[in-house]
Image (cartoon, rainbow, N blue to C red):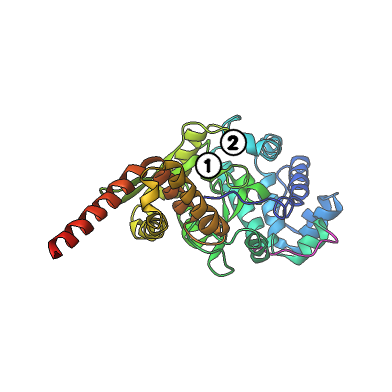
Amino acid sequence: MRRIPLSKTKNVYKFTNHFISELFEWAFANPKTSDDDKLVNTISMPRLKKVAKHFPRVRTEMSNLSHLDRIMHISSTYDYYRKNYREIIRGKKRAIHFDRKHTETLHKAFLYFYENLLDNEFFWEVYNPGVPLMKREDFRDSIKSSIKICPYCDINLITKTDTNVDHFLPISKFPLLGIYWANLVVACVSCNGNLNKKDRWKLPVLHPYFDEVHESVKFRFDHSKEFVGLYARKKHAKVVSSRTRGMNYIWILKLDTRLEDIWPTVRKTQSDLYHRIKDFKHTIMTNRKLYISIIDYYINKEIKPGIGQTSFTKLSLDYCDDRKMNGYHDYCKWFAKEQADMEAYFASRR
């Protein structure tokens, strides 16, 4: 539940736009072209020709695309998504969908591009010359240099073996975004498994590249039942349509059910914070400002240094915020009871 810095991410796969644009341009100019060796002779773009010669499967997918009607509309839709992705995510522009035949053909092609071209050195040399190959595991490492914990769940580490590159909007429903840079998000295996969405997606939704997710999605604590829930803030200055997008984010990732049994984790923060406050118990009972400052000190000293580096920092931050707002009288009651119990004990010993 953390925004991913875009310094090393934004342009990693941006060069693929040229490949896709040339692909659609060729398909429009060469309708219903057969999948055979002569297909290469119909390609006038040097880069696309090299790739088609090198990868027989690319030629197959090119032929399949050339048999689709309204290919210019598909190409325009790709440009629309590429230019308006952030606005679509925010609900400011609508998503465009194709019929089943078109979606299946595009999904098959873009899934192949994703699985076989992004990690291929020859493809990089043709469409991104002079830039060292960055495989998907290297892409994960580039994210790991700034954030070590999964941005979706704030629990699991980002590693080479336990992390995947997720299609934020599912490729099965949004095939044109199969290799679009902004739709590729590094996530832990657990979240990626939950994000094999198929039909499980909603727009608008928060996005970890563009939104301060942690400002919109908040934990709610029920101390009597020892239960943790999630909710989306109704409004936030930094997050467009905060409540709706936050609710959809929680639903898509199943965070409301995946994180409901984490009270044992809350107990650690609860215990640490209690002992920090207890050292000043005689003073805080008449000084709420001191109480707030102790919690703020604990946040800055113990929690914030771990943001993006250790698990459950979001949970700990929200718990501390909850205690600042709702915990003062609880602590005062506890300390008063402890004092009364102690006085009663010593009185009984006299």
Which portion, as a residue range, is magenta? 129-136
Extreme residue in the bottom direction: 161
Say if mark 1 contacts mark 2, CB within 8 Å: yes
Q: What residue type is labelled 1?
A: Glu
Q: Is residue 71 above or below residue 314?
A: above
Q: Nearer the viewer, residue 26 or 256?
A: 256
Q: Is residue 348 above or below residue 335?
A: below
* Residue 290 picture location, percent across and down: 46, 46
Viewport quadrant of the C terminus: bottom left
- The residue identified by callout 2 is 238
24 in the magenta segment = no
Left or right, residue 86 beside residue 304: right
* Residue 234 picture location, percent across and down: 46, 32
Q: Which of 337 and 43 is in front in this view?
A: 337
Left or right, residue 58 beside residue 170: right
- Dot 2 falls on a residue whose secondary structure is loop
Q: Is residue 298 above or below residue 231?
A: below
Q: How crowded is mark 1: few (under 14 residues within 10 Å), some or many (20 or more)?
A: many
For marks 1 and 2 on the same chain, the one whose residue lies earlier in the sequence: 1
Residue drawn at 34 percent across, 60 percent down: 264
Q: Which amino acid does label 2 sit on?
A: Lys
Number of marks: 2
The answer to whether any part of residue 13 appears in the image is yes
Q: How crowded is mark 2: few (under 14 residues within 10 Å), some or many (20 or more)?
A: few
Left or right, residue 283 beside residue 224: right
The quadrant in which residue 207 appears is top right
- Dot 1 falls on a residue whose secondary structure is helix
Q: Nearer the viewer, residue 249 or 66?
A: 249
- Residue 215 image label: 1
* Residue 173 picture location, percent across and down: 54, 44
Secondary structure mainly formed by the magenta segment:
loop
